[in-house]
Amino acid sequence: MQIREVYDLLDELSPFSLQSEWDNSGLLIGDFDLKINYIYLSLDIDSDLVDRLEKNSLIIVHHPLIFKGLKNINYSKYPANIIRKMIEKNISLIAMHTNFDQTHLNKFVAEDILGYEVKSCDKFVCYFRVDSSLDSLCLNIKSKLGIKNLRISSSHKHIKDCAITTGSGGDLIDEIQADCFLSGDFKYHQALEAKENGLTLIDIGHFESERFFGDCLAQYLKNLPLKVIMSNSKNPFEYK
């Protein structure tokens, strides 16, 4: 199967044209005419994951390996060290980032993982009804996402309407029309602003909220004549 065939399927599912201006989704390494033997799905790509991949494979990730223009290719530094390994093993790379956030991932985490029914979506934000105590909401999040502790900036004891943006959504705080906002990577001053404006924040982690990328995408690749392998990268953070 050629990469072009997979790319066209992905583009129909979640058009790459939807990606943000600063993003770099699409075919990042490889050639549309290359034939591949396996497809891997992962949130990110790191050295350990590349070592495990079979030769002549395509890996589809959420986060682009190449974001900014590379001024040099230093094999001892990221991301050139990974790119070198991939080229040696003839491994191609497609990223589906902000386009997939908008079309699938945010809604998937809200409904299929957390168990809430999404009422509306506004680009990167999905809204759903909770109507429960903050404590109950937090217990559900910890259970479904596998998080032991949550970082919270609380303005409500009872949550009616909730919003979610997987990954890093702190810059969207001013746009949220809900009692509570679930996202990752919240900054100190964002939490202070939200608290003053009556918005409860629950930090659900960047990796923890987006690690379901492969699960979400895999359901649309079941009929491909290739083996699709789930092989997620590791969270770069450790908790002591």
Image (spheres, rainbow, N blue to C red):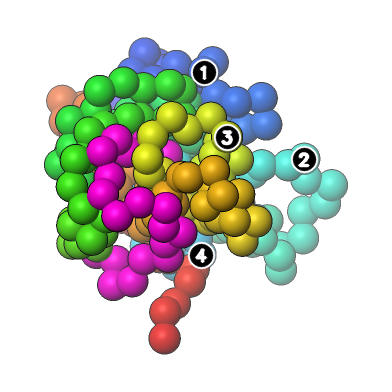
Q: Residues within 10 Å of mark 4 (few under 14, many from 20)?
A: some
**Residue on which disc 3 sits:** 174
- Residue at left 24%, top 28%? 118
Find out whether the residues at labels 4 and 3 contact each other: C-beta distance under 8 Å: no
Residue 124: horizontal and vertical position, in percent?
A: 46, 29
Front residue of this view, candidates 6 and 187: 187
- Extreme right residue here? 71
The dot on residue 18 is 1
Quadrant location, the N terminus: top left
Q: Residues within 10 Å of mark 2 (few under 14, many from 20)?
A: few
On the image, which quarter does residue 14 sit in? top left
Sequence-first tag of 4 and 3: 4
Residue 128: horizontal and vertical position, in percent?
A: 26, 32
Sequence-first tag of 1 and 3: 1
The dot on residue 47 is 4
Sequence-first tag of 1 and 2: 1
Tell us which disc is closer to us: 1 or 4.
1
Find out whether the residues at labels 1 and 2 contact each other: C-beta distance under 8 Å: no
The answer for how far apart the CA atoms under marks 4 and 2 are is: 21 Å
The answer for how far apart the CA atoms under marks 1 and 4 are is: 29 Å
Sequence-first tag of 2 and 3: 2
The answer for how far apart the CA atoms under marks 4 and 3 are is: 38 Å
Magenta residue span: 144-166
